[in-house]
Image: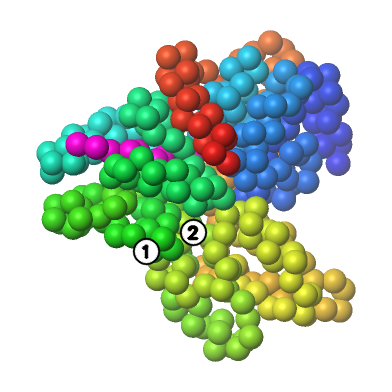
């Protein structure tokens, strides 16, 4: 309790806003000024009147706030990496575009999931592309289809494949599928993925439906297509929260997304049975999202008070300006 009080005091002294992604530990979400998914946090944190943002999440999220609000100072108690975002960088993006052009695909419209670094977002912007999140991906795809070009979706192959299925479109995965299949596809996906959301399987769904015949299955679109096809509801983090919290308390639901979020979703009241389950036989906990602790937040604030640049997010101006074009386009379309 004393540590939380000290943190709140320092936040007020430093004119700082504490922001936490939904997948963070309970202790972080409970004390945060703002908690939400990627889109919500990027928008609200960049529009805040506070001069400093303390971002509890993974690296690309802190970058997104800095890109949208370059005048703010953005710090991260832990600059944790997102494994998916690490699967592609500027050089891999360039190689992918070169490979697509070698297949005779000249007109390419890139769409990058927000789980990517600033350099990748900047390169997407150079080709006239746009950023998306899981909550606005459908709207962004509608815009992308109107460009009458091959859509190159990166880095999450699952989200790209699921969008294609939902819209009756052909998809292929670069580096996995044949050149012929890639040339026929309307959405070409980069071969990236979320290690946490890969844990959910059709067998998990079958297990819960056999045990609880009337249970609802809710999953994130980063899950594999065969899992998404079997689900009753598919949505972003915020959409999952809204859906589950709208259910009758007696309705059983198994949720396929990060453990910390599911654990907080709908706790049973005293004397009631558990009706919200994690859709996995193993604990789907994101290791990097769980790195940040209250002690890290406190150390970050104490360092800032002493005038030290503690895990401050700094970006090259040219990269930040180009990446901002792709992010701004996303926000306009959302």
Dots 1, 2 in contact, CB < 8 A: no
Quadrant in the picture for the C terminus = top right
Q: Which quadrant holds the N terminus?
A: top right
Compared to residue 194, the image places residue 276 above or below, namely below
Please name the residue shown 79% across and 71% down the image: 268
Residue 1 lies in the magenta stretch = no
Q: Which residues are the magenta region?
A: 106-115
Instruction: Give the SS element for disc 2.
Output: loop
Few, some or many residues within 10 Å of mark 1 (<14, 14–19, 20+): few
Q: Which residue is mark 1?
A: 168
The answer to if 110 sits in the magenta stretch is yes
Circle 2 packing at 10 Å, graded few (<14), some (14-19), many (20+), is many
Which image quadrant for residue 28? top right
Question: Horizontal and vertical percent for residue 303?
Answer: 68, 19
Discs 1/2, front = 1
- Give the image location of residue 149, x and y in percent: 29, 42
Residue at left 47%, top 25%? 325
Q: Is residue 291 visible?
A: no
Which label was assigned to residue 36? Answer: none
Q: Which numbered dot is residue 221?
A: 2
Q: Is residue 182 left or right of residue 19?
A: left
């Amino acid at each position: 309790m004393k540590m939380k009080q000290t943190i709140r005091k320092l936040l007020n002294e430093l004119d700082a806003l504490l922001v936490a992604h939904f997948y963070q530990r309970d202790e972080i979400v409970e004390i945060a000024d703002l908690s939400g998914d990627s889109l919500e946090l990027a928008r609200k944190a960049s529009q805040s009147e506070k001069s400093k943002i303390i971002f509890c999440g993974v690296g690309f999220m802190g970058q997104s706030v800095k890109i949208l609000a370059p005048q703010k100072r953005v710090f991260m108690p832990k600059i944790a990496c997102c494994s998916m975002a690490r699967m592609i960088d500027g050089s891999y993006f360039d190689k992918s575009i070169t490979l697509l052009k070698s297949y005779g695909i000249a007109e390419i419209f890139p769409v990058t999931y927000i789980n990517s670094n600033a350099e990748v977002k900047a390169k997407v912007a150079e080709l006239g592309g746009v950023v998306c999140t899981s909550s606005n991906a459908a709207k962004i795809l509608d815009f992308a289809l109107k460009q009458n070009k091959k859509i190159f979706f990166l880095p999450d192959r699952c989200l790209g494949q699921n969008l294609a299925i939902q819209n009756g479109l052909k998809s292929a995965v670069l580096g996995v599928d044949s050149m012929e299949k890639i040339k026929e596809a309307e959405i070409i996906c980069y071969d990236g993925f979320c290690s946490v959301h890969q844990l959910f399987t059709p067998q998990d769904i079958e297990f819960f439906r056999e045990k609880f015949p009337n249970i609802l299955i809710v999953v994130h679109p980063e899950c594999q297509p065969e899992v998404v096809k079997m689900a009753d509801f598919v949505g972003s983090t915020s959409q999952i929260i809204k859906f589950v919290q709208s259910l009758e308390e007696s309705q059983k639901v198994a949720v396929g997304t990060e453990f910390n979020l599911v654990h907080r979703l709908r706790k049973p009241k005293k004397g009631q049975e558990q009706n919200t389950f994690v859709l996995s036989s193993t604990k789907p906990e994101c290791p990097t999202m769980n790195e940040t602790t209250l002690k890290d937040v406190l150390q970050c604030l104490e360092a800032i008070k002493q005038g030290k640049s503690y895990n401050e997010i700094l970006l090259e101006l040219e990269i930040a300006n180009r990446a901002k074009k792709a992010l701004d386009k996303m926000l306009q379309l959302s």
